[in-house]
Amino acid sequence: MIYYRPVNAAPSIVVDRLRIRRGGVVVLDDLSLSVASGRVTGLLGPSGSGKTTLMRAIVGVQIVESGAITVLGEPAGTPPLRWKVGYMTQNPAVYGDLTVRENLRYFGRILGAAPESVEEVLATVDMTSFGDRVVNRLSGGQRARVSLATALIGSPELLVLDEPTVGLDPVLRRDLWKAFNELAAQGKTLLVSSHVMDEADHCHDLLLLRDGKLVATGTPADVRAQSGKQDLDEAFLVLINEEVA
Amino acid sequence: MSFRATFATAVRVLNQLRRDPRTIALLLFVPVVLIFLLDQLFHDRRPVFQQIGGPLLGMFPLIAMFLVTSITMLRERVSGTLERLMALPLAKLDVLAGYAIAFALVAAAQATLVSIVAFGFLGLNTQGPSWAVVLLAISNAVLGMSLGLFVSAFARTEFQAIQFMPAFIFPQILLCGLFTPRSQMAGWLRGVSDALPFTYAYDALHRATALGTFDGRFALDLTVTVGVTVLALALGASTLRRRTG
């Protein structure tokens, strides 16, 4: 089930004419967009479309050539934001030689989170029974969930999650999307990337990126209307091909 | 800089080591085995054992921590955990100080164990107090750590990081005065030797063990060792980038 929230507050993220070059290649060019507060926004697009680069820029770890990004009212990457923005990288950025709880305790301590929050985020990602396992011994999907848990700890206002559901089984994916929607219902803002279009229906808003350019925005209903297709997969194919033609 | 984040990092690094008992065993017992080999090798030439045994005790932690740090930091950079940390409210100095505290503790254990064996069982003598050797060993370990941290920025793979050991460490061991007194070196070699930090680390150990003279030259040795440590840490900190391309 999806909890709809009105778009009332100021947007959590405003990107203004962003231009980023990586390895000599322009990855994002003149990109402008905004992400509403208290909602789940899906950042969708084929691999290589610039999703990860945009997310890195929003959390402030990416060198930006020009343009501006405002996050929660402050320029992206400024020190106060490091307390308020949770970031899940695409490849699990956790310590493989530590247990799941040791990892979470470390990230929690840096953020000054209460010790109980370790168990809370473990429950959210359904990893409580694996808490004392060493991360290197876990499966890829379990490792991804530990990485997600490290982003959730400290209850950040904004969550930037880079492909959090990739490689997970359908039941778990459904549960995670439910958890994302619950977080949004509590007032958190979520920006979630995916290259699996059928996940788009779990989002309140969508941003469709192709070759570093925004090809569609709006609610899933808007995107359907814009493309004239009921199936979101087909809708995206229509929109992407329109751009090419 | 925050005490909490520094302490959390030190605990995390020690936990990682704790999960790797083989490395702990190697760190603790390899120096003991080597000093025993040296003892046997110079069984009939005790003055040689007395001459090089003491300084070697204080050099083991330097080499071990150089290797451990360069590999660990490289892993942090490659695995994405460093990028993750840089998006958190954690000063670069917290990361470095956390590492320094953890590795200094390991170096203290390493130096204490090998000192007990060498001074207690192998009949190694020292003119100065034996705790001075342990203290110098710890300060050398932090020097090794800071050098390892700095060079890790120039390695892309673990193979490269390992090769920095023969490239950076071996020439310094050859020229520090351990194998040939510096007074007998060719002029240009002595000039090179003057510019290498190991020369001062060795000289301090030589003065503490063979001569027992804690004079002005000893103070200079300590100043250079600490100064190079601080310089390498500052350079190393500058290689930890919040934003990358």
Image (cartoon, rainbow, N blue to C red):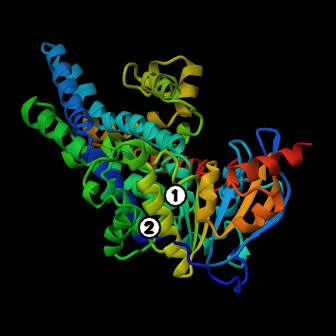
Assign a secondary structure to mark 2.
Answer: helix
Answer left or right for A21 relative to B129: right
How many residues crowd around disc 1 within 10 Å: few (fewer than 14), some, or many (20 or more)? some
From the viewer's side, name the closer residue of A67 and A13: A13
Within the image, what quadrant is residue B5 found in? Answer: bottom left
For marks 1 and 2, give the CA distance: 9 Å
Q: Is residue A101 above or below residue B149?
A: below
Residue A42 image point, x, y percent: 65, 61
Residue B91 image point, x, y percent: 53, 64
Instruction: Give the residue at x 12% y 35%.
Output: B117
From the viewer's side, name the closer residue of A194 and A240: A240
> Mark number for residue A110?
2
Residue B130 image point, x, y percent: 19, 44
From the viewer's side, name the closer residue of B101 and A64: A64
Looking at the image, the residue that sits furthest to the right is: A245
Instruction: Give the residue at x 55% y 61%.
Output: A87
The reply to whether callout 1 and callout 2 are in contact (CB within 8 Å) is yes
Looking at the image, the residue that sits furthest to the left is: B121
Within the image, what quadrant is residue A225 found in? Answer: bottom right
Answer left or right for A113 relative to A46: left
Q: Which residue is mark 1?
A: B85
Residue B78 image point, x, y percent: 53, 40
Can residue B15 be seen by looking at this rendering? Answer: yes
> Mark number for residue B243?
none
